[in-house]
Amino acid sequence: MNPEGIVPMTPEMLDRWKILPRLMMLTMTAVYIRCVEWALSLGPELTTQQAGLISVITGAMTGSFAIWMNAEKSNEKGMDK
């Protein structure tokens, strides 16, 4: 802490707070929601190809979320050491 009472932001602190991975997951989730909104707005005109695209995006988001959650869990175990 410096004389002004401000804690300096260090790369290690940013790493510990995991800001970038959380921001990326937030962005991916927002884009995923927009894709689903787009598909739902098409209604009965949704083609098989468009439904397939949404299916692939959903699978990718599921995988990304699982990897992210596993990484969060393994990082918490590492911090206990």
Image (tube, rainbow, N blue to C red):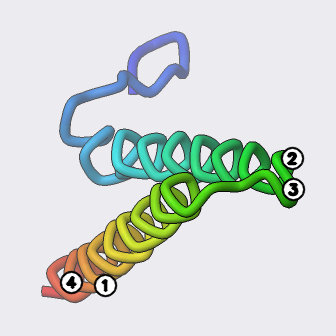
Q: Nearer the viewer, mark 1 or mark 3?
A: 3
The structure residue drawn at horizontal position 37% and vertical position 22%, both measured from the top left corner, is 8
**Which tag is nearer the camera, tag 4 or tag 2?**
2
> Horizontally, is 40 left or right of 47 in the view?
right
Describe the element under mark 1 as helix, strand or loop: helix
Is the C-beta separation of discs 3 and 2 under 8 Å?
yes
Q: Earlier in the sequence, mark 1 or mark 3?
A: 3
Q: Amino acid at mark 2?
A: Ser
Q: Amino acid at mark 1?
A: Lys
Residue 53 placed where, x, y %? 46, 56
Residue 46, numbered circle: none
C-alpha span from label 1 to label 3? 39 Å
SS category of the residue bearing label 3: helix
Q: Which residue is mark 1?
A: 73
User: Is there CB contact under 8 Å for labels 3 and 4?
Assistant: no
In which quadrant is the C terminus drawn? bottom left
Q: Residue at x 25, y 46 (%)?
A: 15
